[in-house]
Amino acid sequence: MHKFKLIKNENGFRVQFVYRKEVIFWTESYTKKASAMKAINSLKDKALAAEIEEVDETIAVPEKAPIKKGETKKVVAKKPTTKKVAKKK
Protein backbone atom coordinates (compact mmCIF):
# COMPACT_ATOMS: atom_id res chain seq x y z
CA MET A 1 0.00 0.00 0.00
CA HIS A 2 2.80 2.45 0.88
CA LYS A 3 5.56 2.91 -1.64
CA PHE A 4 8.23 5.25 -2.88
CA LYS A 5 8.11 5.99 -6.59
CA LEU A 6 11.33 6.96 -8.35
CA ILE A 7 10.26 9.01 -11.36
CA LYS A 8 12.54 9.88 -14.24
CA ASN A 9 11.68 13.09 -16.12
CA GLU A 10 13.38 15.63 -18.38
CA ASN A 11 15.00 17.32 -15.34
CA GLY A 12 16.40 14.14 -13.82
CA PHE A 13 14.74 12.18 -11.03
CA ARG A 14 12.22 12.90 -8.31
CA VAL A 15 10.68 10.83 -5.56
CA GLN A 16 7.05 10.45 -4.55
CA PHE A 17 5.69 8.72 -1.48
CA VAL A 18 2.36 7.13 -2.37
CA TYR A 19 -0.37 5.58 -0.22
CA ARG A 20 -3.29 3.88 -1.96
CA LYS A 21 -2.65 5.72 -5.25
CA GLU A 22 -2.58 9.09 -3.46
CA VAL A 23 0.66 11.08 -3.51
CA ILE A 24 1.40 12.02 0.10
CA PHE A 25 4.57 14.02 -0.62
CA TRP A 26 7.20 14.51 -3.29
CA THR A 27 10.75 15.77 -3.52
CA GLU A 28 12.59 18.26 -5.61
CA SER A 29 14.24 17.08 -8.82
CA TYR A 30 17.63 15.41 -8.51
CA THR A 31 20.09 15.34 -11.41
CA LYS A 32 21.42 11.90 -10.43
CA LYS A 33 19.52 8.73 -9.64
CA ALA A 34 21.91 8.05 -6.75
CA SER A 35 20.90 11.35 -5.11
CA ALA A 36 17.21 10.45 -5.38
CA MET A 37 17.91 7.02 -3.86
CA LYS A 38 19.86 8.73 -1.06
CA ALA A 39 16.78 10.87 -0.32
CA ILE A 40 14.59 7.74 -0.12
CA ASN A 41 17.01 5.99 2.24
CA SER A 42 17.33 9.10 4.39
CA LEU A 43 13.55 9.31 4.76
CA LYS A 44 13.33 5.62 5.63
CA ASP A 45 16.06 5.94 8.28
CA LYS A 46 14.87 9.14 9.93
CA ALA A 47 11.08 8.98 9.66
CA LEU A 48 10.56 6.53 12.53
CA ALA A 49 12.56 8.66 14.96
CA ALA A 50 11.04 11.97 13.84
CA GLU A 51 9.30 14.03 16.48
CA ILE A 52 5.71 15.16 16.05
CA GLU A 53 5.24 18.91 16.21
CA GLU A 54 1.70 20.07 16.73
CA VAL A 55 0.94 23.50 15.28
CA ASP A 56 -2.35 25.35 15.73
CA GLU A 57 -2.98 27.71 12.81
CA THR A 58 -6.57 28.47 13.65
CA ILE A 59 -7.51 32.12 13.98
CA ALA A 60 -9.90 33.21 16.69
CA VAL A 61 -12.48 35.42 15.01
CA PRO A 62 -14.21 37.77 17.41
CA GLU A 63 -17.97 37.81 17.31
CA LYS A 64 -19.51 40.74 15.47
CA ALA A 65 -21.44 43.22 17.54
CA PRO A 66 -25.09 43.11 16.56
CA ILE A 67 -26.35 46.04 14.50
CA LYS A 68 -29.58 47.52 15.79
CA LYS A 69 -32.51 48.06 13.48
CA GLY A 70 -32.13 51.28 11.50
CA GLU A 71 -28.45 51.58 12.41
CA THR A 72 -25.80 51.53 9.70
CA LYS A 73 -22.14 50.84 10.02
CA LYS A 74 -19.62 52.93 8.09
CA VAL A 75 -16.50 51.15 6.91
CA VAL A 76 -13.50 53.32 6.10
CA ALA A 77 -10.59 51.83 4.20
CA LYS A 78 -7.17 53.09 5.13
CA LYS A 79 -5.10 54.58 2.34
CA PRO A 80 -1.93 52.54 1.79
CA THR A 81 1.24 54.32 2.74
CA THR A 82 4.06 54.61 0.26
CA LYS A 83 7.67 55.39 0.85
CA LYS A 84 9.49 57.61 -1.61
CA VAL A 85 13.01 56.57 -2.49
CA ALA A 86 15.47 59.24 -3.56
CA LYS A 87 17.15 58.58 -6.90
CA LYS A 88 20.91 58.23 -6.92
CA LYS A 89 22.79 60.67 -9.11
Image (cartoon, rainbow, N blue to C red):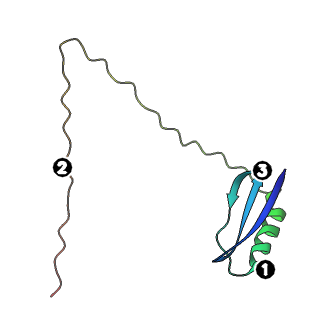
- Mark 1 highlights which residue? 34
Q: Amino acid at mark 2?
A: Lys
Q: Quadrant of residue 15?
A: bottom right
| Foreground label between 3 and 2 | 3
> What's the residue type where badge 3 is placed?
Tyr
Which mark is first along the chain, 2 or 3? 3
N-terminal-most mark, 2 or 1: 1
- The local secondary structure at tag 3 comes to strand
Q: CA distance from mark 3 to mark 2?
A: 49 Å
**Label drawn at residue 79:** 2
Within the image, what quadrant is residue 6 found in? Answer: bottom right
Residue name at image x 84 percent, y 50 percent? 1
- In the rendered structure, are the residues bearing label 3 and label 2 in contact, judged by CB atoms less than 8 Å apart? no
Query: In front: 39, or 86?
Result: 39
- Disc sitting over residue 44 in the figure: none
| Numbered tag placed on residue 19 in the rendering | 3
Q: Amino acid at mark 1?
A: Ala
Q: Position of residue 64 (x, y in %)?
A: 35, 24
- The residue under the point 79% across, 58% down is 47
Residue 76: percent from the left, percent from the top? 18, 37
Residue sitting at 39 percent across and 24 percent down?
63
Q: Residues within 10 Å of mark 2 (few under 14, many from 20)?
A: few
